[in-house]
Image (cartoon, grey):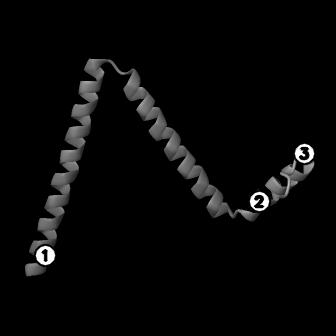
Amino acid sequence: MPKPKKGKAAKAVKKDELRALTKVELARKNDKLKADLKKEQQELGKMVMTKRQRKLFQEAEKTEKSKKETAKALLAKKKKLAGKK
């Protein structure tokens, strides 16, 4: 079993790996990290909320979800009506 590289050799390998990644891959990786961080911050924020704040937050999420469902239903109706013509 090969020993893990240490010191300068390991740093050189890491630099080579970073160079191998294209700008698109780096951007995608950064976007994923940002999304994960945002999601984690929201979860932590939920844990710290008071009961009243949590209730308001849940109501806001519920209304947002219902608006999206309504919009989706309306778009489906629009497509259906457009198809009849």
Q: Please, what is the three-letter code of the amino acid marked with disc 1?
A: Ala
Q: Residue reaching furthest front?
A: 1
Q: Please, what is the three-letter code of the amino acid marked with disc 2?
A: Glu
- Give the residue pinned by disc 3: 7
**For the residues marked 3 and 1, what is the alpha-carbon distance in whole angstroms?**
66 Å
Residue shown at the point (16%, 66%) measured from the top left = 76
Task: Give the label on residue 59, or none.
Answer: none
Quarter of the figure that contains the C terminus: bottom left
Give the image location of residue 67, x and y in percent: 19, 47
Give the image location of residue 47, x and y in percent: 39, 25
Q: Label 2: few (<14), some or many (≥20) within 10 Å?
A: few
Q: Please, what is the three-letter code of the amino acid marked with disc 3?
A: Gly
**For the residues marked 3 and 2, what is the alpha-carbon distance in whole angstroms?**
16 Å
Judged by depth in the image, the label closer to the viewer, 1 or 2, is: 2
- Give the residue pinned by disc 1: 82
Residue shown at the point (91%, 48%) measured from the top left = 8
Give the image location of residue 27, x and y in percent: 61, 56
Task: Give the label on residue 17, or none.
Answer: 2
Q: Residue reaching furthest bottom?
A: 85
Tag 3 near tag 2, CB within 8 Å: no
- Mark positioned earlier in the residue sequence (3 or 1): 3
Residue shown at the point (52%, 39%) measured from the top left = 37
Dividing the picture into quarters, in which one does residue 72 lie? Answer: bottom left
Mark 1 secondary-structure assignment: helix
Q: Residue reaching furthest right?
A: 8
- Mark positioned earlier in the residue sequence (1 or 2): 2
